[in-house]
Amino acid sequence: MSTDLLTPTDSVILTGSAAKQLRKLIEEEGDTERMLRIGVKGGGCSGMSYILAFDTPTDMDVRLEQDGVAFIVDKRHLLYLGGTELDFSDGLDNRGFVFSNPNATSTCGCGSSFSA
């Protein structure tokens, strides 16, 4: 899958606050062999959990860049993540990354897992 053919509804969309926080994390990581991975895995109370971690790219990955943040997504995960917005909340009662996934048919109470 060519990244030139991806539209925002096919990909993960980073908000400005998420991009800012991710740039900080990438700078702190400092490992040029690994990239930021956004994905999903089986598990969690709703069936699938989000992945946000540093990992080594594979042939199954699409390399993307938004707002100065380079990241990888497994091509197979785009089915579940297409159109997902990743935000970063820095409030007093809630701090961390927040996924808003239009493909999720249900989510758990904490928002870290979903079913599609």
Image (cartoon, grey):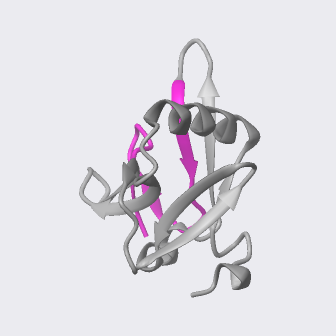
Between 95 and 104, the one lying in front of the other is 95
On whether residue 17 falls in the magenta region, the answer is no
- Residue 109 location, quadrant: top left
Does 36 sit above or below residue 7?
Answer: above
- Outermost residue to the top: 92
Between 77 and 105, the one lying in front of the other is 77
Between 59 and 47, the one lying in front of the other is 59
- Outermost residue to the front: 32
Percent across and percent down for residue 70 are 61, 55
Q: How many marks?
A: 0
Q: Is residue 53 left or right of residue 103?
A: left
- Residue 71 location, quadrant: bottom right
Between 47 and 79, the one lying in front of the other is 79
The answer to whether one can see residue 104 in this image is no
Question: Which residue does the image show at 37% across and 73% down from the upper left?
Answer: 58
Question: Which residue does the image show at 44% across and 43% down from the upper left?
Answer: 111
Percent across and percent down for residue 106 are 44, 59
- Residue 40 location, quadrant: bottom left
Q: Which residues are magenta?
A: 95-116
Q: Quadrant of the C terminus?
A: bottom left
Percent across and percent down for residue 89 are 61, 29
Does 48 sit above or below residue 58?
Answer: above
Q: Quadrant of the N terminus?
A: bottom right
Question: Which residue does the image show at 72% across and 81% down from the upper left?
Answer: 4
The answer to whether one can see residue 6 in this image is yes
Percent across and percent down for residue 107 are 43, 52
Question: Which residue does the image show at 50% across and 63% down from the upper left?
Answer: 72
Does 112 sit above or below residue 93?
Answer: below
Q: Is residue 55 left or right of residue 93?
A: left
